[in-house]
Image (spheres, coloured by chain):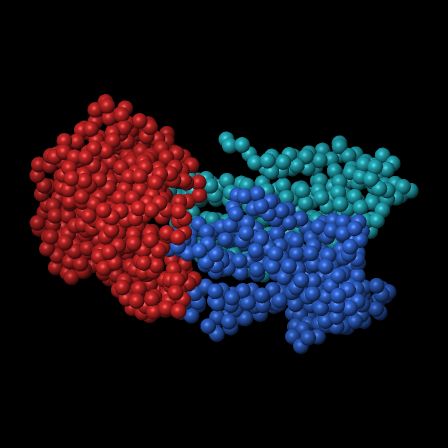
Amino acid sequence: MTLFILRRLGMTVVLLLALSLLVFGLMFAAPGDLARNLLGTKNVTPEALAQIRAQYHLNEPFLEQYWRWLAGAVTGDFGTSIRTGGSVGGMLTSRVGLTAAISGLAFALSVLVGVPAGVAAALRRGSWPDRLLVGVSVVGVSAPGFAVSLILLYVFAVGLGWFPIYGTGSGFLDGLWHLALPSVALALGLGAFVVKLTRAAVLRELDEDYVMFARARGLAPGRVLVIVLRNAAIPIVTSLGLMVGYLFGGTVLIEVTFALPGLGALLEQSVLFKDFPVVQALTVIVAFVISMTALLVDLAYLAIDPRVRARTVRR
Amino acid sequence: MTAPLLKTTGLRVTGPSGVIVAGLDLEVGHGEAVAIVGESGSGKSMTAKALSGLLPRGVSASGEIELEGDPIAQWRRVRGSRVALLLQDPFTSLSPVHTCGAQIGWAVRDRRRRAERVRSLLAEVGLSADVAGKYPFELSGGMRQRVAIAAALSADPGLLIADEPTTALDVTTQRGVLDLIGELRRERRMGLILITHDLRLARSRADRVLVMYAGRLVESGPADEVLRAPGHPYTARLAECDPPLDRRLPELVTIPGSVPQPHSVTAGCPFAGRCDLVVDSCRTTTPSLVETGAGHLVACPRTTGEGLAPSPPVSMDRPEPAEPRPADEEILAVRGLTKRFRGREQPALDDVSLTVGRGDAVAIVGESGSGKTTLARCLVGLERPDAGTVEAPSRIQIVFQDPYSALNPGMTVGTSLAEALAAAGRPRSEVGGLLELVGLPGAYARRRPRALSGGERQRVAIARALAPRAEVLVCDEPVSALDVSVQAGILNLLAKLRADLGLTLLFITHDLAVARQVADRVHVMYQGRILESGPAGAVLSAPRHDYTRRLLAAVPGEE
Amino acid sequence: MRRLPVTIVVSVVILTVVLACAIAGGLIAPHALRQSLYLGSVGAGQAGHLFGTDQLGRDVLQLSVAGARSALAGPVLVALGSMLIGVLMGTVAGYRGGAVDMLAGRYADLLLAMPAILLAIVVAGLLGGGYWIAVGVLVLLFSPSDVRLVRAAVMEQASRPYIESAKVLGIRPRRIMFRHVLPNVFPIIVANVLLNVAFALVALSSLSYLGLGVPPGAADWGRQLADGRQLLGSNPLASIVPGLLIILTATAVNLLGDWISDLLDRKVATR
């Protein structure tokens, strides 16, 4: 069992290394002279270029440069931003709270609404509420986050004026009010996915023999449902992992649209500006979080599915 | 007079394509065992589901059902506590993520005494108390079915409906489970409806038998009587189609044609198309059930009330070699074959050696896990052994068990055969000859597999295997997935091909009676080893190994 | 043939219209890019513009029609390109196994560990953006899941008795692959290509929205949304119209893909 966790952690480390190497390498693949890019907005003079080259050790072999970055990254020092000149680590910590809040709200909303909706739809397969829900979820999955955001913004903020258009607000409740629309926008796309998935998983289980056998013994429909859900939990948990990936992609779009100063907006600005240190740091952090989530999902499997438990222990 | 335990009148089940069961009357008394016998398409499974109110979506039932004289108001109150259904496949009827104890306990109302009740139920089905904490995947098929039985009985129903409860189990396990059901029935004074396709099983386990064909009841009566002196031609022929274990027939009895879909039978007797006693009126008037003896009902105008004569009269048994024939030419030799699959402790093949002479018919008999399928696959090159040698001619071919996946559904029969011919360098013109060889009309070349019945598809699979002029044909359970009435046709075909083409047959099966009919020599396998070999007649009448004896004892009707 | 559900008919109609705009955009909306800085952004129905104009005075309706091309061309290429890689690598991996399978597996694991859109943003952005770079990046990012899909489908087919019989009969592996395996895998491929088109449309328009796709000033729905963000007050239609168009098109393709998927499941069940 511990062997299993160690093996997974090992794979995560390999993944992070590969990814950071890739992003680091992109720095050199980018068009234009690297030193010039790194100068950013400052004046381009031969002295400045030489100074930049020295500062970023650009004359050293690639792997040494990478090693230098890696050594720093492991201790938490991600260098300085080209765009703002500030510490990358500092920028990240100041923005992480907002992104976490939006993501967390959206995740909670989508699961708390999506899972029951999916289950209800599966139980009433073919009826009009089911078909409506399926239709809505197809649209939700097809609609890109920013399109939905803009429509929501227009209808609720500009049109009806129920919510503020931009900004983060001050204080807890005001902050929540400001985050309501972005969280809902993000939750819609995610929620649609959850509904689709939950419905499919429950439908599959309902067709199984053990459900018929349970009913044949006179178990009440509610009881049978609990049994079904216990089995359906397995594919649902799998997809929760996928959802986290979607969440990250969506966050960028939402934050940009609502002008919220979170990590997503930071990524967009940094990519456009070619602020490499920030992009590198963000990519690695995101990959880390996703890998941790995947590990948690695998551990959840062990808890839910006794067959997986048996297989893993035997190894 | 007390009302019968269950009584249904005019039960009619309809599905999306039409009628599935047409007007069935059934009565089960307290403590009585009734068997419903039928082949595929007879409607027996749907009847079982209708009798517990568990029809799938799109299927509805009409008619009257009474439990102990009272009509059923709400199914949920009745299920489990008065009527329980036991499903066929123990591998899917239990929830994979809950412990066996939990699942048995679900239908036990009294929460405080639940654990105790589960323990006593486990004891009743012959399992130790620690099974309660195990998960289904940790148990064997037979044990799982016992857990399922315990679960079905947990609310103390008065009637148990068992839908083919042992079909998915190994032969040696089957007997144990059937014995258990019989015991429980007696101890609890429970009624039993046993759904099966096996007439012999029905005879040995039931008091009364109902025979269904294409959704209709064709005969019913006391088990012994119906099987000793069948009134309906179908029952008679069906009984004859069962290959006997104690002797070898020159040709097995078969019923030509195949079972029609229940909804396609409009007027007249459903069996008319295949019956050898048919007259014109059979095709126009639907026969009704007529009482020919005490409690013996037959739906056939041609019945005489004294039982029908067997047909065609079997003159003498086919001689079988008492001694192993001196091998004129060894065509297949396996030495020291060993194969172990990853993740399994038990090797699939453990130092297996055997030889087959040219023109021989050899049967490899065993249950699941014996390694017989792995052996077959090694012989044709689909599996590579870890150790040992296989000396086989290049012209060795294989026929698989499932006729429904044996042919590419997107290609016509003719194209599949032509492709096989082309791969062997033979001309396309031989397609017609191949079809004729397996007894199919040449026009079938233009048809697609979905237009063919299971038996016909298997014939095409055999024809395809013969396309490269195969010298050795390995048959891996080629008839297990077919109805008994069709089975015999395939076995006869294989025997004929062996005689006409000098084909060498290697027949893999779990069915000893089939092995007796097909093979000169028998090898009995268990857990990767050959335990006993010898002439078919000798091994199957006077076995030497303990395991072989157990296999023989497990055959229904052999007690 | 049973009557098609209404949603499918509507979806096909929508897609036909979009396709027509993509192909014949120049004929239908010849003045899409004509700017009128003097006019600026006006609301719906004013100055002869049905949906108003954007901040550069371009007619929203005409611009949207012209944007259909980038909405379909790129995503279709992404889906087809990705599936091509999927088929090439997936069939070999699924049928032969061995080294190719291992490589394909690791490649897939690596790329699937990161959300596609995020990686697309990073890679496309750092490489300087641009529509075709974005398309190329997306092809690479979508391919691992297609490889997995094809591989699984091929493996499932390969264990079927009629495939094994074909092997024993000595039919050549290439013929088995093309004549037996792929025709049965093909329907799954088609359904998945459609679903990928929808997904790619969303991804590509997201990239354009963020400024990483088409160059500024080009006709593209995502770009229109980005530009229209500031115009919510003066002409909300400048962003709502292209937004709805993206949603409608993606939904139509998704519905079509789901319907074909269901059709195939039912067909397989009745064999």
Specify the colour of chain B: red
Q: Residue B145's spot in the image, x, y percent?
A: 31, 58
B213 versus A118 height, above or below: above
Towards the viewer: B322 or A47:
B322
Front position in the image: A18 or A249: A249
Measuring 21% from the left and 24% from the top, which residue is drawn there?
Answer: B279
Image-based side of B502 in relation to A173, left or right: left
Q: Residue furthest front?
A: B1
Which residue lies at the image location 35% right of the left edge and 38% below the top edge? Answer: B63
Chain letter for the blue part = A
Tag count: 0
Q: Which shade of the palette goes to chain C?
A: cyan
Camera-side residue: B85 or B454? B85
Front-most of A195 and C31? Answer: A195
User: From this viewpoint, which residue is outermost toward the bottom?
Assistant: A75
What is the residue that sits farthest to the top in this orientation?
A: B280
Residue B201 x %, y % = 21, 48
Location of residue B31 with respect to A56 vertically, above or below: above
Residue A136 visible to the viewer: yes
Q: Quadrant of the C terminus of chain B?
A: bottom left
Q: Residue at x 20, y 51 (%)?
A: B205
Task: Give the side of residue C154 with respect to residue B66, left or right.
Answer: right
User: Could you say where residue B135 lies in the image, as x and y percent from the top left?
Assistant: 38, 64
At x 13% / y 44%, what residue is drawn?
Answer: B248
